[in-house]
Image (cartoon, rainbow, N blue to C red):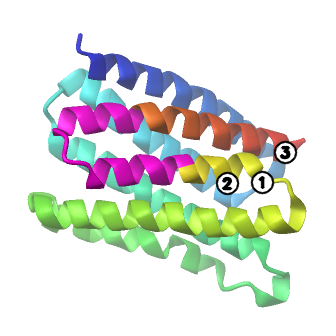
Amino acid sequence: MSLLSWVSILLLITLLYSLIIVVTTAKKANSVSLWLLSIAIISYSGSNITFLIKGGSDILIRWFNFSSLVCLVSFLFAMIRESKPIFARFPSYLIYLPFITLLFFPLIVHQSVIVNLLLGTFEIGCATVSIMMYGINHIKNKDSSEHLMAAFVFLTAILFYWFTPLNVDTKTLITELLIVPGIILITKGIKKKSK
């Protein structure tokens, strides 16, 4: 087994722990955003399971990664909606607007440049919006330090993956090792807020 497979197993264990915490919290809070986050975790777990089982199935791994990002974008939309007063909230169906991109993904799945551009845009967008949201929330309430640190860890992982001149396996290895503490931090923050 390669080192990348062991890191993928570590990531799966972390994702399972996170999924248990997020689903438990989502049941208590009845929060749409947490349910979307749990779907994103399941989808990202699917890409790691696919990697471990079928090593070279890049299209399926891309599909799982992209669907996870779509769920994360919807999660951020739901969080933005939930953070506003009731009279200022946008309609709830707009939360699910990013799922439209999943319909068009099969048309571009074989175009590596377009897929990478789409993945990079979604990833950097999610991390940037998270930093802004959690930064504002931390300034107001001083209770989002774990979320803010996690968003910075995710942004570091994303920037490392897209902007370093290393080979793909090394970049993937280091990026996934950075994602693990990010997941732990965000899970810790969700658990702390649910108390």
Q: Mark 2 points at which residue?
A: 148
- From the viewer's perspective, tell me whether residue 27 is left or right of residue 155: right
Horizontal and vertical percent for residue 120?
Answer: 32, 61
* Mark whose residue sits in front, 3 or 2: 2
- From the viewer's perspective, tell me whether residue 11 is left or right of residue 21: left
Quadrant containing the C terminus in the rendered view:
top right
| Residue numbers of the magenta segment | 153-176
Within-10-Å neighbours for mark 2: few <14, some 14–19, many 20+: many
The amino acid sitting under disc 2 is Leu
Comparing 64 with 162, the one in front is: 162
- From the viewer's perspective, tell me whether residue 28 is left or right of residue 179: right
Q: Name the secondary structure under disc 2.
A: helix
Q: Tell me, yes or no, if residue 4 can be seen here.
A: yes
Residue 45 magenta: no
N-terminal of the two: label 1 or label 3? 1
By secondary structure, the bulk of the magenta-drawn segment is best described as helix
The amino acid sitting under disc 1 is Ser
As measured in the structure, the alpha-carbon distance from the residue carrying label 1 to the one carrying label 3 is 12 Å
Q: Mark 3 points at which residue?
A: 194
Q: In which quarter of the image is residue 61?
A: top left
Q: Tell me, yes or no, if residue 73 can be seen here.
A: no
Identify whether 166 is placed above or below 4.
below
